[in-house]
Image (cartoon, rainbow, N blue to C red):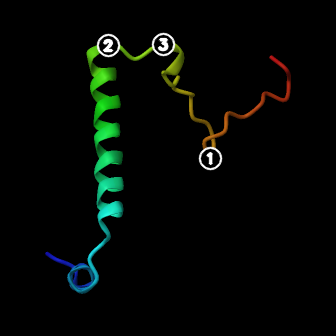
Amino acid sequence: MLDPRWLLRASLWVRNPPSLKRVILVFATIALALAIIGVEKLGFWPDWAQADRVPRGIGGVTPIDPKGD
């Protein structure tokens, strides 16, 4: 179901639409993100730019072993 806050936001956008520069900025950002995703899916993304998965511990931080093992 549609939240009434979204209707208020839509009515504000109708009354005060974003500037052309803002619209171009948003679409350029989306296009850049899609281009990066496409390059990565095609396998052309360099290995040095890929993120490594870090094992999660308590609170996202891996605990240090107090014994030093």
Where 36 falls versus 4 (above or below)? above
Report crowding for label 1: few under 14, some 14 to 19, many 20 or more residues within 10 A (C-alpha). Answer: few
Q: Nearer the viewer, residue 61 or 10?
A: 10
In which quadrant will I find the C terminus?
top right
Q: Where is residue 32 shown, x and y percent of the image?
A: 34, 38
Kindly indicate the quadrant of the structure image that contains residue 43.
Answer: top left
Front label number (2 vs 1): 2
**Residue occupying image coordinates x 14% and y 75%:** 1
Front label number (1 vs 3): 3
Q: Nearer the viewer, residue 9 or 16?
A: 16
Report crowding for label 2: few under 14, some 14 to 19, many 20 or more residues within 10 A (C-alpha). Answer: few
- Residue at the disc numbered 3: 47
Q: What residue type is labelled 2?
A: Gly
Tell me, yes or no, whether the two marked residues, 2 and 1, touch with CB atoms within 8 Å. no
Q: Where is residue 29 shown, x and y percent of the image?
A: 36, 47
- Residue at the disc numbered 1: 59
Which element is circle 1 on? loop
Q: Distance between the residues labelled 2 and 1?
A: 33 Å
Where 28 falls versus 40 (above or below)? below
Tell me which numbered mark, 2 or 1, is placed earlier along the sequence.
2
